Amino acid sequence: MIKFSEYISNGGPYCLIDTDSVPLHIQRDYVIRNENVKNGKPLCLRCNGTGNELFSMYRKCTVCKGTGISIN
């Protein structure tokens, strides 16, 4: 598990993220992402597994329809 700042600086590797280190307004996105990583699901390339559009709390990803899982 890595800190959010390490995750951002390393270009978003496929690993679990310490959600306590994530800014509060996007924390739920990374809980979803961690669940997808734990379940071995391929992450959506557009939203990186969070299910939301580019750090947006209110818009579902248009590619994965908010699941965070790659459909390809």
Image (cartoon, rainbow, N blue to C red):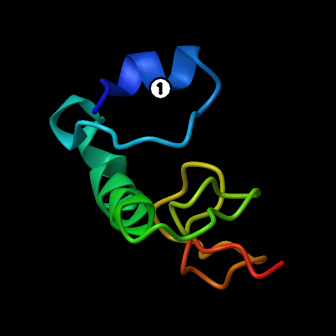
In the picture provided, is 57 more to the left or to the right than 31?
Answer: right
Location of the C terminus by quadrant is bottom right
Where, by quadrant of the figure, is residue 15 drawn?
Answer: top left
Kindly identify the residue that appears in the image at 55 percent across and 69 percent down.
51
Kindly identify the residue that appears in the image at 50 percent across and 70 percent down.
58
Dot 1: element: helix
Kindly identify the residue that appears in the image at 37 percent across and 66 percent down.
32
49 to 55, vertically: above or below: below
Tag 1 residue: 7
Where, by quadrant of the figure, is residue 57 drawn?
Answer: bottom left
48 to 59, vertically: above or below: above
The percent coordinates of residue 25 (x first, y second) are 31, 48
Where, by quadrant of the figure, is residue 1 drawn?
Answer: top left
Q: What kind of residue is marked 1?
A: Tyr
Q: Which of 7 and 28 is in front in this view?
A: 7
34 to 9, vertically: above or below: below
Assess disc 1: are there few (<14), some (14-19) or many (≥20) residues with their C-alpha within 10 Å of its C-alpha. some
The percent coordinates of residue 44 (x first, y second) are 69, 64
The percent coordinates of residue 41 (x first, y second) are 54, 71
